[in-house]
Amino acid sequence: MDDFSRLREIMVASQLIPRGIKDNRVLEAMRKVPRHLFMPLPLWGVAYEDNALPIGEGQTISQPYMVAVMTELLELAGDERVLEIGTGSGYQAAVLAELAREVYTVERIGSLADNARECLAGLGYTNVVVLTGDGSRGYEEKAPFDRIIITAAAPQVPEIIIGQLKEGGIVVAPVGERFSQIVVKGRKARGVLVEEFQVPCVFVPLVGEYGWKS
Ligand code: SAH
């Protein structure tokens, strides 16, 4: 076991299991994905600590617990097509790629999308497509999706996104004010979202047509 896998073991045992993450497939993915490789080299030493960290362009890679909790809420069994909005580093996309069949992830900042694409390809993920653009409008070309995860904060889940979710599908997203939100899980039933879960969080804003304006 190398030093980084040992740090991942400790991360899972001290940050995830005690806070209630139970899904074994999620825990296994968190043990496996090399989070440090999605960060700038100077941050590798703190990559497995209990924090969000800067990845450039004023954006962040989410805290490990937040990645785990949102992933668990998606209830992935392995055969899903998933849309992620807010690629950032690509780390959450890698975790999703371990647990679902196909992942489409959209990032508005070109340099971050390029880095994430390169990192994911370097790790051998062939089931993730990184797109550059305004994800607040979803990704109509590949809709409908079984699951949608938004990893940037919006005033609410955009209606256009709910339209791209399959009936019975799950969306997980931080919604609320600009500097404080709650993660909501909603399941689509007869065309509308039924909310099932909430946990407080702080995400960078979703900036775009159906998010914040700047
Ligand atoms: N999931 C990421 C963390 C996301 S940080 C990870 O694992 O590292 C939120 C990201 O959402 C930022 O990179 C930000 O640029 C991006 N973002 C903000 N508004 C967006 C939009 N309208 N469409 C796509 N990406 C957006």
Image (cartoon, helix red, strand yellow):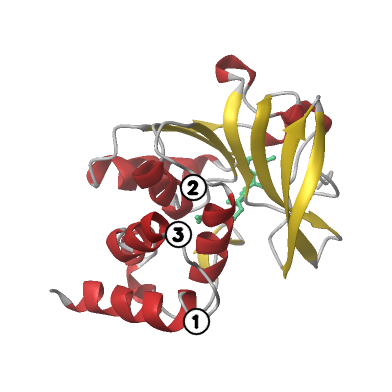
Q: Do the residues labelled 1 and 3 touch (CB within 8 Å)?
A: no
Q: Where is residue 187 in the image (x, y as percent from the top left)?
A: 72, 39
Q: Position of residue 41 (x, y in %)?
A: 32, 69
Quarter location, residue 42: bottom left
Task: Mark yes or no: residue 213 visible.
Answer: yes
Quarter location, residue 184: bottom right
Along the line of sight, which residue is nearer the eye, 132 or 80?
A: 80
Neighbourhood count class around disc 3 (C-alpha, 10 Å): few under 14, some 14–19, many 20 upward: some
- Is the residue indicated by label 2 positioned so its CB lies within 8 Å of ligand 1? yes
Task: Mark yes or no: residue 63 visible.
Answer: no
Along the line of sight, which residue is nearer the eye, 73 or 123?
A: 73
Amino acid marked by disc 1: Pro
Q: What residue would you read off at disc 1? A: 18
Asked if residue 138 lies left or right of residue 121, the reply is right
- Is the residue indicated by label 3 positioned so its CB lies within 8 Å of ligand 1? no
Cα gap from disc 3 to disc 2, whole angstroms: 29 Å
